[in-house]
Amino acid sequence: MSGAARQTLDAAGVQAMLDGSPFIGFLGLRVTEVDADAGRVSMTMPMRPELERGGPIAGQFHGGPVAALIDTAGDFAVAVAVGGGVPTMNFRVDYLRPSGGAALQAVATARRIGRSMAVVDIDVTDAEGRLTAIGRGTYSTKVG
């Protein structure tokens, strides 16, 4: 367990961890659901000018913040199951359509949590409920 203490993480605990990160705080991520038994975490990311792609079409998220949302949601789907923050081993993103609107919603579901690694699928939808990106991440299950 790398010397880190295990803890029970509910929505308030996950939000406190998110708020403790300057980068995640900048993104404005907000927890909307935590289900440790199902290995599922949902969170939103509001649109702000600094996260926009730029160019001729205003209001579209840049791919970098979308990837950060995917990675963070995936990480916490494991964290709530194992009792603390875990490092990312690898993740991928497939952008299905431009992500725009007032906010994006990420739903991360752990598919398998083993002794040393976990696999998580993450769906990102826009305010209209359209699937805009999907991700799959592998994370260490060692807290720390």
Image: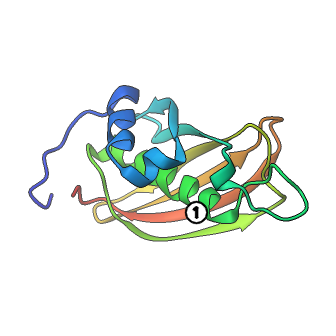
Q: Which residue is mark 1?
A: 136
Q: In the rendered view, how is the structure colored?
A: rainbow
The answer to whether residue 45 is left or right of residue 4 is right
Q: Amino acid at mark 1?
A: Arg
> Relative to 141, does residue 13 appear above or below in the rendering?
above
Q: Quadrant of the N terminus?
A: bottom left
Image quadrant of residue 125? top right
The x and y percentages for residue 37 are 41, 34
The x and y percentages for residue 66 are 64, 57
Res. 9 visible in picture:
yes
Residue at the image position 80 percent from the left and 37 percent from the top: 129
Residue at the image position 8 percent from the left and 57 percent from the top: 3
The x and y percentages for residue 106 are 62, 44
The answer to whether residue 101 is left or right of residue 135 is right
Front residue of 4/22: it is 22
Residue at the image position 45 percent from the left and 42 percent from the top: 39
Badge 1 marks a residue whose secondary structure is strand
